[in-house]
Amino acid sequence: MEQQSGLNLIELIMKGGIIMIPIGFLSIVSIYFIIERWVFIHQAFKIEANFLANLKDLLGKGDIKAAKAYCQRLNTPISRVIEKGVNRIGKPIKDIESAMESVAGIENDKLEKNLGFLGLTSGIAPMLGFIGTISGIIKIFYNISVSDNISIGIIAGGLYEKMITSGAGLIVGVIAYAGYHLLNTRIDRFNNKLQETAMEFIDILES
C-alpha cells in the first residue's frame, strides 16, 4: 500500500483554516516592525567619535552658534538632545538639564514606536491559535454527533489540522515577545549612552 506523502509548509498553513489569516498578518507585521525598529535604533547609536571633544573646542572659543550648527549637522538623537542644551547656555544648569530631559523623552518615544504592537501580538497570537483549535474540536465533535461515527481516524485527522493554528500562534507569539524584549534592551542601552553623553556635556559647561 502506498504511503501518504508528507505535507509541505503551504499545505499545513492551508489546513489551519481561516484563523491562519490573522495569525499570518500578525507574523508579517511583527517581523517587519522588528527589522525596522532594529535598523532605526542602530542608526540612533551613531555619533562622531570626537563629538564632545569638538563641541568642547567650539564652546571654549565662545562660538555657541557654531556649536549649535554642528549638532544640527549631525542630526542624531544624541546631538538633538545636546543641541537643546547648547540653546540654553547662559541659563541655570537645572534649566539646561530639564530642557535636555524633555528632548530625550521625545527621542525615546520615537525609538519605542510600534513596540506596543509587538507586546500585544505576543499575547494575542497564541490566543488566536487556541481559538482556532477549540473551534476545530467543537466542529469535530459536532460532526461525530451528526454522523454517529467516532473512529480514531476522524478524530485524529481533524484534530491535527486544528492544532496547526495553536502551533502557528505560539511561534508568532514567541517571535513578537523576543523581538519586543530585544528591542527594549537596545533602547535601554541607548538611554544609558544618552545619559552618559548628557552628563559629560554638563561637566563641560561647569568646567
Image (spheres, helix red, strand yellow):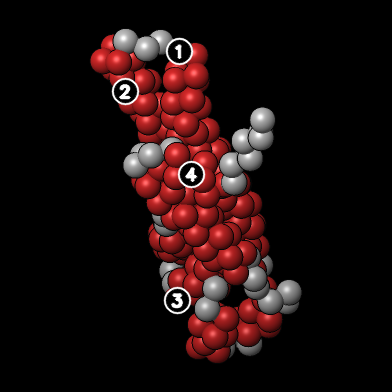
Q: First in sequence: mark 2 or mark 3?
A: 3
Q: Is residue 148 above or below residue 114?
A: above
| Residue position for label 2 | 139
Residue indicated by mark 4: 13
Using the numbered discs, state the Cα–Cα distance from disc 2 to disc 4 in whole angstroms.
19 Å
Residue 124, percent from left and from top: 39, 36
Q: Earlier in the sequence, mark 2 or mark 4?
A: 4
Q: Is mark 4 on a helix, strand or loop?
A: helix
Q: Nearer the viewer, residue 2 or 82?
A: 2
Distance between the alpha carbons at the discs numbered 1 and 4: 25 Å
Q: Please indicate whether residue 177 sits to the left or right of residue 25 in the image.
A: right
Q: What residue type is labelled 2?
A: Lys
Q: Which of marks 3 and 1 is in front?
A: 1
Indicate which label's residue lies in the foreground, 1 or 4.
Answer: 1
Image coordinates for residue 169, horizontal then vertical, percent: 47, 36
Relative depth, front residue between 55 and 46: 46
Q: In which quarter of the image is the N terminus?
A: top right
Residue at left 37%, top 47%?
Answer: 21
Foreground tag (3 vs 4): 4
Q: What numbered label is drawn on residue 151? A: 1
- Mark 3 = which residue? 87
Crowd around label 4: few <14 · some 14–19 · many ≥20 (10 Å): some
Report, in whole angstroms, how far the alpha carbon at label 2 lies from the one at label 3: 67 Å
| 101 relative to 47, above or below | above
